[in-house]
Structures are given as C-alpha cells and as structure tokens.
Image (tube, helix red, strand yellow):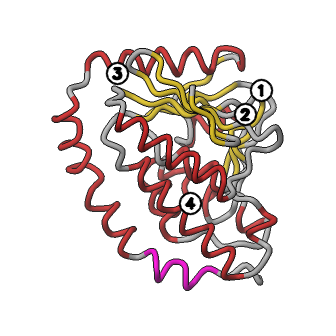
Amino acid sequence: MNESGSVSYQLVDAVALVTIDDGKANALGHEVLGGLEAALDQASADKAGAMVIKGRDGKFSAGFDLSVMTAGVEQARELLARGARLGLSIFECDRPVVLAVTGHALAMGGILLCSADIRVGASGPFKIGLNEVRIGMPVPSFAVELCRDRLSPRHFNQAIQLGHIHSPEEALAAGFLDELVDPEAVESRAMEIAAELASVIHHGPFKTTRSNVRGELAGQLRDGLERDMALFDVTG
C-alpha cells in the first residue's frame, strides 16, 4: 500500500483502490488533489483494469478546502483549476472509475460524482449536491457541463442553478448516484463492480470508446478553463 498524506493507494488484484481520509471532512486541498493525481498515475503504471475511489466513513468529500477558497481570488482560482483538471482526468480516464460514496458529497465532491462511471452511495442521513450558490460561490462552467452530462434533465436546474442538497435517495433519482447500499457495504460493492468491469472490458477498445464518448466535451472544457477561472469570483 502506498500512502501520501490523506490519500492511500492499494492494488487489489486488477483493481486500484484509492482511499481519501483526512480524519475530518475530506476537504480537497492541494495535498489531497496531489495524492489523487499520483494515484491516477500509479493506476496507469500498474495497468490496473479499473479504479475505485472511496472516502472515509460518513464523508466522501465536503468539496474544496474553504481555507484556501476564501484566502483570496487567486488562491481560489489556483485550487479550482487544479480540481477541474483532476475532474477531467477522471472523466477521461482510460479505465473504468467507480466511486464508493461513503457519505456526504458536496460542492467539488458532488462534481467528482459526475466525472466517474459508477457511483455506489451509502444510504443514510447524508447530503449530496452542489451548494455553491448557497455559500456565495458560482458554479464554474466545467462543473456545469460535467454535471449536465450525467444528471437527469428534470433535476438539473434544481441541482445546479438552485443549489438543492439531495438525500441519497434524491441523488439516485437525479443522477449523482447509480445505486444505494448500506454504509458498511459501500466499499465491498464498489470493489465487486470494479473487479467485474476489469475482468470483462478490453483496455484498447475502452480507451478508444472513451475518447469517442467524452473526448470532445473534455477538450472543450480544458480549452475553456482559463476563461472559466477568470470569471470565477468568490466576493459575491
């Protein structure tokens, strides 16, 4: 097992298991983002057939580290851009990515849900969604489009424009999640799905199909990141 601060990596047969656990809310600061970037690179080097990213008990991720996001516009834009690149890397990953959504997933945590292939959520009193407009931040274009790609059109405006926070059952209907299980079964179910995908999917055809399905949108979002960041303002 490889550990880098709050992120650990373990290859379990053909599945790369990545765990985020900062002992608190799993906020996405530079350390955690760096650990996730390294995990994606390691999964590629290991030729893993699939990847699982899981949170800690009760918390998948509360989103970006607010101490950085409120430190100033440039600091917020720098962290946001790094998070955007990570989300796009997951969106374009050349192996299936399964998320073990162990609890709350808010803001960038919710955006990551829309970057992955399969999302297994924990049933319970958890909050899932993009609450940016309710905490004084805009939803950047890259996040809007990643979510538009995965969310139900019927739920999209409420989720993104109005910042509705979903229960796990609502998140399942909206498209943030693909299935719900008891909290203690989230990791095992995500690993089961990933192992099955790793055993049946051929890497070359998957990679080509991934590009066919997501490459154009991902390219547009990458090309627009500089403008996207320039428009991002946390001053209200």
Query: What amino acid type is highlighted by mark number 1?
Result: Gly
C-beta proximity under 8 Å, tags 4 and 2: no
Amino acid type assigned to the residue bearing label 4 in the image: Gly
Q: Position of residue 34 (x, y in %)?
A: 57, 53
**Label 1 vs label 4, nearer the camera:** 4
**Disc 2 residue type (three-letter):** Gly
Is residue 231 part of the magenta span, yes or no? yes
Helix, strand or loop at mark 4: helix
Segment tinted magenta in the rendering: 225-232
Determine the main secondary structure of the stretch shown in magenta.
helix
Looking at the rendered structure, the secondary structure element under dot 3 is helix
Spot occupied by residue 29 in the image (x, y as percentages of width and height): 69, 57
- Distance between mark 3 and mark 4 Cα atoms: 26 Å
Earlier residue among tags 3 and 4: 4
Above/below status of 46 relative to 75: above
Does label 1 or label 2 sit earlier along the sequence?
Answer: 2
Say which of marks 3 and 4 sits in front. Answer: 4
Q: CB atoms at circles 3 and 2 under 8 Å apart? A: no
Residue at which label 3 appears: 197
Q: Secondary structure at mark 1?
A: loop
Tell me the number on the disc at residue 216: none
Q: CA distance from mark 3 to mark 2?
A: 24 Å
Are the two marked residues, 1 and 2, in contact with CB atoms closer than 8 angstroms?
A: yes
**C-alpha gap between disc 1 and disc 2:** 8 Å
| Image location (x, y in percent) of residue 17 | 52, 27
Which residue is more in the foreground, 88 or 173? 88
Q: Mark 2: few, some, or many residues within 10 Å (few <14, many ≥20)? A: many
In the rendered view of the protein, which quadrant contains the C terminus? bottom right
